[in-house]
Image (tube, rainbow, N blue to C red):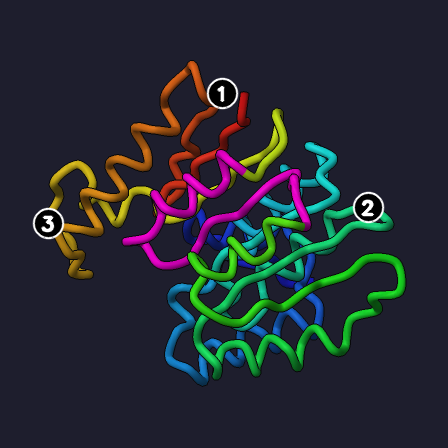
Amino acid sequence: MRETVLTNKDNYLASLLKDETELKQQSRKYAEELGLARISISAAEAQLIKTLVRTHGAKRFVEIGTLTGLSAQYLWEALPEGGELWTLEKDPKHGEMAARIFAQLDQSKKKIHLVMGDAREELEKISAAGPFDGVFIDGNKAAYFDYLTWAEKNLRSGGLILADNVFLSGAVWGETTQQRFSEKQIRVMQDFNKRLADPDLFEGAIVPTFEGLYIAIKK
């Protein structure tokens, strides 16, 4: 049997993970068709958020930024029987692709609710279903602080907050990046990170992934 040549960290991490399911691979294929494969969560990071949500014991969870339904599948798998996931997406094309994926999942024991529209508006509409156990923030970067404000009001004490892309490729500390971020996006993300770092409000830490993953518990 020929051994796989492991040339870097990503290859090594991939070698430790089981192959993704056909539905997850389909979500990746849809993202490729949209030209957005680069912003799909990696398998290693997706497994991390799944483990965190399962360990936390969250049952009612919210995701902001569905894309083609890849991370939602990991989150949904982490929920116990009777769990519910609300996943919010603004782009109709993304939502259409995600809906095709979700329609193929056995939701007899736990549910996924695909919510279409601007997250800042739709979050207020689903607030009545709260309080929630956690939220994964991976949407409009300029709206991250608005999402956090909503989470502070609608997560239970001890609720889990996961937020991806909090480094903005280094822009939050002044690094020149290949991807252009607006001054507003940078300022909002800096304020977002500072707020989550407040020990009177949250217990948290940043996992230094390539894009930065913030993990916080609401006090």
Q: Depth check: 29 or 198 in front?
A: 198
| Residue nearer the viewer, 69 or 116 | 116
Mark positioned earlier in the residue sequence (2 or 3):
2
- Please state which amino acid type lies under the numbered disc 3: Thr
Tell me if label 2 and label 1 are in contact, CB under 8 Å.
no
Looking at marks 1 and 3 on the same chain, the residue that comes earlier in the sequence is marked by 3
**Secondary structure beneath disc 2?**
loop
Q: Residue at x 36, y 23 (%)?
A: 197
Q: Is residue 218 above or below residue 179?
A: above
59 horizontally vs 187: left or right = right
Between disc 1 and disc 3, the foreground one is 1
Q: Is residue 142 magenta?
A: yes
**Crowd band around label 2 with a 10 angstrom C-alpha radius: few (<14), some (14–19), many (20+):** some
Instruction: Report the span colored magenta.
Output: 129-153
* Label drawn at residue 80: 2
- Disc 1 to disc 3, how far (Cα)? 30 Å
Determine whether 142 is above or below 199 in the image.
below
Type of residue at label 2? Pro
| Mark 3 burial class by Cα count in 10 Å: few <14, some 14-19, many 20+ | few
